[in-house]
Image (cartoon, grey):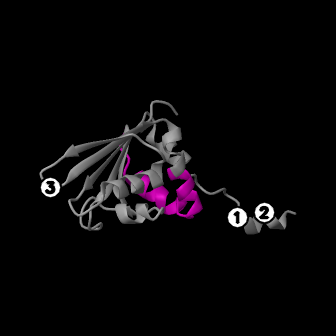
Amino acid sequence: MSDIVVNIEVQVNPTEDLQKVKHAVENIFGALTFNVKPKTWGQLLTAKTTGTQGLTKLSNLLNRERILAAARKVLRNAMNEDSITFYLNKQVAYAGHISFSQQTAESPLGPIKVQIRCDNPRKLVDWLAPRPPPKTRKNASRSK
């Protein structure tokens, strides 16, 4: 997988602490360089990372939280021919966990928008949230 570009956007409301919002994003993607743009209402926080190394922490969280099947479904539904766009709950990310959300209404302070551009979104989803092996642990233990 080459030519992966991850763009992250988060609305920072006037009632929110900018450092806490940055912390929420870094909990999911690791250390990033941020840009902050003033908006009519609050600020827009953006960050960019490239390659699979920028997605390793996200992949590890999906695995650790045992939500690979749900993540695969969300990510597959979020694919088009050259990108994947999805939203994460900002408050849950601050706590170091993953919760997918809708673009509006589900996250009171607004979601973290993630857009991943790549040559092969299907292959990237398979890497981020791998399908479980065909044999279950129960079947594997019988062969021992």
From what the image shows, is residue 39 above or below residue 98? above
Q: Position of residue 47 (x, y in %)?
A: 35, 42
Most extreme residue toward the top, as rendered? 3
Residue at image position (43%, 53%) is 75
Indicate the quadrant containing the C terminus: top left, top right, bottom left or bottom right.
bottom right
Q: Amino acid at mark 1?
A: Thr
Dominant secondary structure, magenta: helix
Identify the mark nearer the N-term, 1 or 3.
3
> How dense is the environment of label 2, judged by Cα within 10 Å: few (below 14), some, or many (20 and up)?
few
Q: In this orientation, does residue 1 appear? A: yes
Q: Is residue 118 magenta?
A: no
Magenta segment boundaries in residue numbering: 58-81
What residue is drawn where x is 47% and y is 55%? 27
Q: Disc 1 vs disc 3: Cβ atoms closer than 8 Å?
A: no
Which residue is denoted by mark 1 in the rendering? 136
Q: Specify the amino acid type for callout 3.
A: Trp
Residue at mark 2: 140
Which of labels 3 and 2 is toward the front? 3
Cα separation, mark 1 vs mark 2, equals 6 Å
Position of residue 73 in the picture relative to residue 68 (left or right):
left
| x and y percentages locating residue 41 in the rendered image | 14, 55
Q: Which residue is mark 3?
A: 41
Please say if the residues under marks 1 and 2 sit with CB atoms less than 8 Å apart: yes
Q: If you read the primary sequence from the N terminus, does the residue marked by circle 3 or circle 2 appear first?
A: 3
